[in-house]
Image (spheres, grey):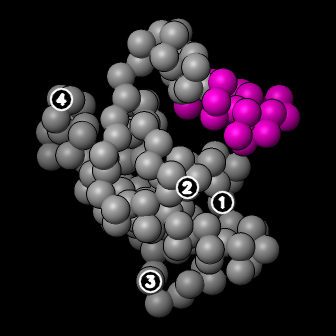
Amino acid sequence: MKTFEQNLEKLLQKGYSPEAAVTLSNSLAKLYNEKTFSGYPDAVKNNAKKGIELNEKVNNKCATQVGKVRARQLSEGASLSLSTVKRMYSYLSRAETYYNPEDTKACGTISYLLWGGKAGYRWSAKILKQEGEIDK
């Protein structure tokens, strides 16, 4: 069974629009009963929205297509699969070093916000701890 993330990447590579790729990936996740999570803090949604706005100001030059899709999901409050929460935590753990809230044109800052920023890191860590995926 492929995870939501694996399906999303494959569909994006095949040329599906981000909206269609998310819809199909969600359908497959439901079909395989992949656990999902929602109800993340407004700060996560707001960070994603800010990242989208900042990226538009630099002509959408920052982030991968998956990062842009993630921001859309977060800004809309969509349910996220466990595999997506793991990926969020992994990305935000590594990318914090590139985040500088003073430099709103830097791709590191924009990408970090697209994935939910520091609030996204805290929320994903909480979920993964709850699920026994991490110890911290």
Left/right placement of residue 81 relative to residue 25 reads left
Tell me, yes or no, whether the highlighted magenta stretch contains residue 70: no
- Residue closest to the eye, 13 or 69: 69
Task: For the residues labelled 1 and 2, say whether their Cβ atoms are less than 8 Å apart.
Answer: yes
The image shows residue 46 at horizontal and vertical percentages of: 43, 67
* Amino acid type, mark 1: Ala
Report helix, strand or loop for mark 2.
helix
The image shows residue 74 at horizontal and vertical percentages of: 48, 52
Which residue in the structure is indicated by mark 1? 63
Residue 121 appears in the rendering: no
Q: Earlier in the sequence, mark 4 or mark 3?
A: 3
- Residue drawn 55% across and 55% down? 71
Q: CA distance from mark 4 to mark 3?
A: 32 Å
Q: Nearer the viewer, mark 3 or mark 2?
A: 2
Left/right placement of residue 50 relative to residue 38 reads right
Report helix, strand or loop for mark 3.
loop
Q: Nearer the viewer, mark 1 or mark 2?
A: 2
Q: CA distance from mark 1 to mark 3?
A: 16 Å
* Amino acid type, mark 3: Pro
Q: CA distance from mark 4 to mark 1?
A: 30 Å
Which residue in the structure is indicated by mark 4? 132
Q: Residue furthest bottom?
A: 102
| Residue 71: image tag | 2
Which residue in the structure is indicated by mark 3? 101
